Image (cartoon, rainbow, N blue to C red):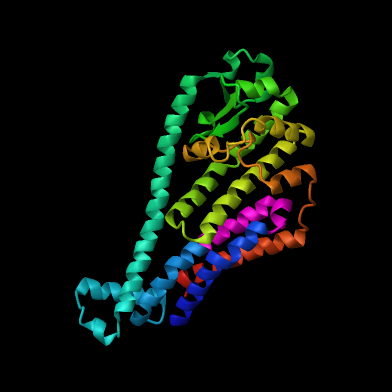
Amino acid sequence: MIPLAVFLAALAAVLAVVLPPLISRARFRTRTPWAAMLLWQAVALAGGLSLIGAPLVYGLSPFGATLHTALATMLELLVAGDFAALVGLHVHPTHVFALCLAVLLGLHLLLTLLRTYVRVLASRRRHRDLVRLLSTPAEQSGATGAHAELGEDVAHVIEHEAPLAYCLPGRTAGRSLTVVSRGLLDQLAPEELSAVVAHERTHLQQRHHLLTMAFDAWYRALPWLPTTRHGREAVLELTEMLADDGALRGHSRTALLRSLALSSSESGEDDAGTGAARRAQGATPGAGGTVITTARLQRLLVPPPALPRTAVVAVVLASAALLAGPTAVLLVV
């Protein structure tokens, strides 16, 4: 079992330190964002399994030749209270420490994810109450012409001159809110407003808030790992690219670019200010200037060709292989 523990430790080091900077700078992410998103999810899951699995497999190594038999033997000894047998099995303090580390790390990741989920739900509930208190439903806001462009989503208009648009996800589609400001309605033409709303609708349809919440929890649990920082930033960028692609299916590139330019012209502090606050409250950042990276802007100005099918298959297979490695060690071996 020691070679398996070494394999998991090496894989964890590669996924935590070596691979994340390479993926975050890879050019293919702008060509086929969903493939890059799939790869990041595989890196996150495989990294978590490897981080927990390496100390777990090492700690159980004195108890048996396979993980299943070793775990069963250890539980039998603990239930029987036969701690003297540990000496005969050559169980050292390092094995005990490794087992405790694996348990604590696993609990830490799960509890951080649960705490993030509960906090986001509570913040989202407060945010929704504030939106309903401080805003007006689009059909009652006097923006009758603009309301036709807001589609079937529940849209609320905030009486503020700053151009702003974002979506607030709900547990069901009927509870999701699309929030726009009066300044945005006044500045955008109907086609541009429609492009912004389509961008937000894509966020809601593809449930991007679940991805951003998971990677944010991963970062909060292990902020000292490069992979958590790169992963959180990459997922925010990729969700915006995917939402752009959703908007471009029914709207012109010019309309989307103009809406981005107008809605971000007066909200330059949104990345560090209101955008971060809305993400903390469970809102999905929208087209209004929240995550306008250089790569995102370049792919809108000069659309790159999609990845060839062989390259897409290679990314999918690489993602499957990354996830299959630690899974096979922990569940099959």
Q: Is residue 172 above or below residue 8?
A: above
Q: Quadrant of the N terminus?
A: bottom left
Return the x and y of residue 38 as percentages of the image width and height: 61, 55
Task: State whether residue 208 appears in this view.
Answer: yes
Q: Is residue 216 left or right of residue 63?
A: right
Return the x and y of residue 149 as percentages of the image width and height: 69, 23
Return the x and y of residue 126 as percentages of the image width and height: 42, 30
Q: Residue at x 64, y 63 (%)?
A: 22
Q: Residue at x 47, y 62 (%)?
A: 48
Task: State whether residue 69 appears in this view.
Answer: no
The chief SS type of the magenta part is: helix
Viewer-nearest residue: 304 or 263: 263
Q: Residue at x 69, y 34 (%)?
A: 260
Viewer-nearest residue: 76 or 266: 266
Quarter of the figure with residue 253: top right
Q: Residue at x 49, y 37 (%)?
A: 277
Q: Is residue 300 left or right of residue 281?
A: right
Highlighted range, magenta? 26-46
Q: Is residue 286 left or right of residue 10?
A: right
Q: Is residue 211 left or right of residue 303?
A: left
Quarter of the figure with residue 315: bottom right
Return the x and y of residue 51 as percentages of the image width and height: 45, 66
